Amino acid sequence: MNRKKILLVALVINLLFLGVYLSIYPLSAAEDTQPQPAAVQEAPKDPGAQWEALRQREEALSIRQQELEKLEKQIDEKIRKLRELDAGIKAEVAAYRQISDERIKHLVKIYSSMKPKAAASLMDSLDTDVAVEVFLNMKGEIAGGILSYMDTAKAATITQRLMSYRNTRQAASAH
């Protein structure tokens, strides 16, 4: 019997606390002070107002779609211009390479027809990059004859560049 009395007293105390809590913090929706976000607000009850709201929203979406289409056209035009520019640059680079290759071939003919000692003295004064290009296009025995008469430091530099060029070509062809 004591247990029943203790449980009954605990129940009454809990109900008392619940009553006090509810009197301090009512569950009424009228006292809810948090504003609702715009997206969650209820639609107007009036069908005419609903139609007007839908019409305004459709008009805003139509304007936005027109703006997006205009931007898309601008982007497409810029892409077209960039492609034309890219094609023009590639054509100019190809023309430059062709002219450069022709000049190198011409130099190869000139230096190949010279005596190795005379060619070596001229090659010593050439830019190293140009000399490497010339030697790349020469036959091995002619290039070797010219290199043997060149300044040893410059000949060593050219030889190293020729080897690194050969290694990069082999690595590129392996991929």
Image (cartoon, rainbow, N blue to C red):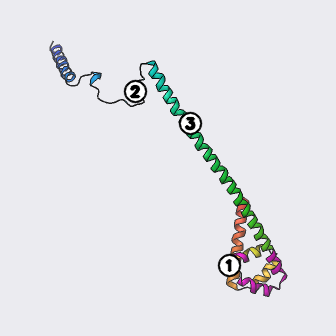
Where 53 falls versus 81 (above or below)?
above
Q: Amino acid at mark 3?
A: Gln
Q: Position of residue 124 (x, y in %)?
A: 72, 84
Where 63 falls versus 111 (above or below)?
above
Find out whether residue 118 is within the magenta segment: yes
Disc 2 crowd rating (10 Å Cα; few below 14, some 14-19, many 20+) is few
> In the rendered image, is residue 103 in sight?
yes
Q: Position of residue 129 (x, y in %)?
A: 70, 75
Label 1's element?
helix
Q: Earlier in the sequence, mark 3 or mark 2?
A: 2
Q: Position of residue 133 (x, y in %)?
A: 74, 73
Q: Which residue is mark 1?
A: 157
Q: Residue at x 50, y 27 (%)?
A: 55
Work out whether residue 52 or residue 15 is closer to the camera in this orientation and state it. Answer: 52
Q: Earlier in the sequence, mark 2 or mark 1?
A: 2
Disc 1 crowd rating (10 Å Cα; few below 14, some 14-19, many 20+) is few
Label 2's element?
loop
Q: Which residues are magenta?
A: 106-130
Which circle, 1 or 3, is nearer the viewer?
A: 3
Q: Which residue is mark 3?
A: 65
Which circle, 3 or 2, is nearer the viewer?
A: 3
